[in-house]
Image: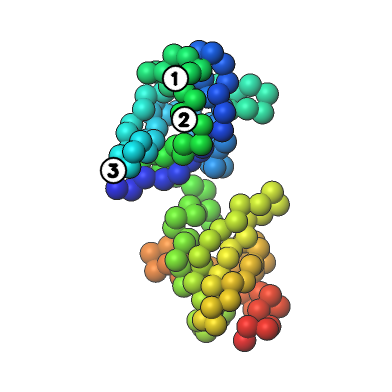
Amino acid sequence: MDNIFLIAEVVDTYSNDGSVIIKSFSDFSERFEELDSVIINFFNKQKSIDIEFVKKVNDLLIIKFKMFHSEEDVLFLVGKKLYISEDKLRDLPNDSFYIHDLLESSVYIESEFFGKLVDVLVLPNNDTYVIKTESNNEVLIPAVKEFIENFNKNEKKIILTKKSKVFFEDEN
């Protein structure tokens, strides 16, 4: 289970039947209803845990795991991250990418190397790329078509538009 991908975190218990509330890191909340299990790290070992049911209650996403039957059983899960294996990743629409595909990409403005993408901030209006420049500074750029000309997943190469130079005038 080398290639696992973060999709959620357990944030609280939900009821005395052992259900938990999760915070989804996925753009596809319906994905949880399609899963029969998730991977959780227990004492530095990855363990697949079967899902009994998933439901939405108002804005909350609730999961009940098969082997836990009371609130006391799941208290230790609060704060645990939920992962899935690579074969359970969903196909994305065109011009959409998983964050793990973007991380460590080389970033260019036109043909000039600018830095490496080191993080993606998931914000309400749009994602924001954190780029570590050659001068070891971190710069933020909105991940919108206006500033991103192209991303080549195979080469891990991001080309920024000329318009994005406004963000980096102090860097060049």
The local crowd at label 1, few if under 14, some if 14 to 19, many if 20 or more residues have their Cα within 10 Å, is some
Q: Amino acid at mark 2?
A: Leu
Relative to 30, residue 85 above or below: below
Mark 1 or mark 3: which is in front? 1
Farthest-out residue, bottom: 172
Which quadrant: the C terminus?
bottom right
Say which amino acid is labelled 3. Answer: Met
First of labels 3, 2 by sequence position: 3
The relative height of residue 96 versus residue 69 in the rendered view (above or below) is below
* Residue occupied by mark 2: 77
Up-down: is 135 above or below 90? below
Q: Position of residue 22 (x, y in %)?
A: 55, 31
Q: Which residue is mark 3?
A: 1
Q: Is 3 displayed left or right of 158 in the figure?
A: left
Could you say where residue 34 lies in the image, as x and y percent from the top left?
Answer: 45, 28
Q: Are marks 1 and 3 in contact (CB under 8 Å)?
A: no
Q: Please state if 60 lies on the left or on the right of 28 as rendered.
A: right
- The N terminus lies in quadrant: top left
Q: Is residue 97 above or below residue 107?
A: above
Element assignment for label 3: loop
- Which numbered disc, 1 or 3, marks the residue that appears first in the sequence? 3
Find the distance from the CA under tag 1 to the CA under tag 3.
25 Å
Distance from Cα at disc 3 to Cα at disc 2: 20 Å
Residue type (three-letter) at the residue carrying disc 1: Asp
Q: Residue 104 location in percent, x, y?
A: 44, 66
Q: How many marks?
A: 3
Q: Which residue is mark 1?
A: 73
Residue at 51% across / 36% down in the picture? 79
Label 2: element kind: helix
Mark 2 crowd level (few <14, some 14–19, many ≥20, 10 Å Cα) = some
Residue depicted at 53% across the width and 61% down the height: 119
